[in-house]
Image (cartoon, helix red, strand yellow):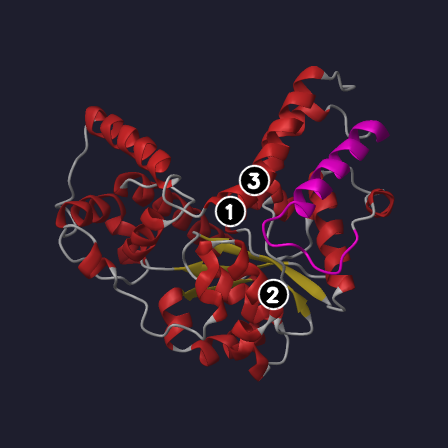
Amino acid sequence: MVPIFMIGTQRSGSNLLRLMLNQLSEIASPHPPHIFERICPLLDAYGDLNIDQNFNQLIDDVCKLVELNPVEWQGVDLDRKGIFSRCKSSRRLAAIYQSIYDIYAEAQGAETWCCKSLVNVNYIDIIEKHFVDPKYIYLYRDGRDVAISFQKAVVGEKHIYNIATDWVQTQEKALELMDRINADRFFSVSYEQLTTSPEKVAKRLCKFLGVKYNNSMMDFYKTSEAKNAANSSQLWGNVTNPVMRNNSGKYKTEMSEDDLRIFESVAGHILDKLGYSRDLVENGNELKFTKADIELFNYLNKLKKSEITTIVDKHDIKRRQRQSSLIRDIVARLDSEQYSA
């Protein structure tokens, strides 16, 4: 299987695109458990993965992470022994990752899979080292609209400076990847293109992936997978509706002038690269932020992140906490147990 990795920043239409791809019989595209993001920081504590006990524990932990995903993976049994057998030639987290996604694709009768964990843009070196010529879909959106969306969401940064900083870093990593791999492995598309001309984009994407376009891609919102996602979080409520073709430029009426100046000062150069026009801050006239300014922004960001949890759906938070609780349990266990180095 030639795997497909979606990269970019959340709140850019990735769930829409995932569900469209999932309509193709050749591609399985489940909701991502963010394996690299959550497990990579813990890897050293597992000790030598060539030791069966250590590697089996890692397999079990990763499987539990998938099984506790907010959007359940339907119709798949993550047999730990089977995964161990698949990983005989490679004792890496990436091998477990690949085996789990391969198993899911096989269960769906698909030829390959797409992982929608956009944060995988931070793990390109791991992906490139393990997988053979993987393909990437770089999905991007006007960062000012991304910021408006994040400020309302249960996930992500909340102060405009922090959102802009993260957005810049992610786009820079994606654009750097685009420059260093062959064009036949990299597909870029904007949210605005996707929502304005979904059929046209879908046909271009299918050609890139080497599969035949199917009109069912436009019926993604009618599927049980879309309903499961929508029922799992307010973040994905729109996926049970057809493509929202006029869902851009919200920042023009919802973002304050002060926030717009901050965003364009931090991220104007990336807006330029991606073809978005600036509204207020011309190139060379960006605001300069002192250390004290940034410390204040960070404080306000932390405060806003705490406040958002008081107004979002409690069931949404509870579903997300299942994976967070698992990670806390794993950390506590790793701290208390002695693994073989």
Decide which of tag 3 and tag 1 comes sooner along the chain: 3
Residue at x 66%, y 18% (from the top left corner): 335
Q: Is residue 78 visible?
A: yes
Determine contact: label 1, label 2, CB under 8 Å.
no
Q: Start and end of the magenta stretch?
A: 52-77
Residue at x 77%, y 30% (from the top left corner): 49
The amino acid marked with disc number 2 is Glu
Alpha carbon separation for disc pair 3 and 1: 23 Å
Front: mark 1 or 2: 1
Decide which of tag 1 and tag 2 comes sooner along the chain: 2
Element at label 3? helix
Q: Is residue 55 magenta?
A: yes
Q: Which mark is residue 315?
A: 1
The amino acid marked with disc number 3 is Glu
The amino acid marked with disc number 1 is His
Alpha carbon separation for disc pair 2 and 3: 23 Å
Residue at x 12%, y 45% (from the top left corner): 285
Task: Say few, some or many: other residues with alpha carbon within 10 Å of mark 3 (under 14 / 14 to 19 / 20 or more).
Answer: some
Q: Is residue 181 visible?
A: no
Residue annotated with mark 3: 37
Q: Which mark is residue 225?
A: 2
Element at label 1? helix
Front: mark 3 or 1: 1
- Quarter in which the C terminus is drawn: top right
Q: Quadrant of residue 339?
A: top right
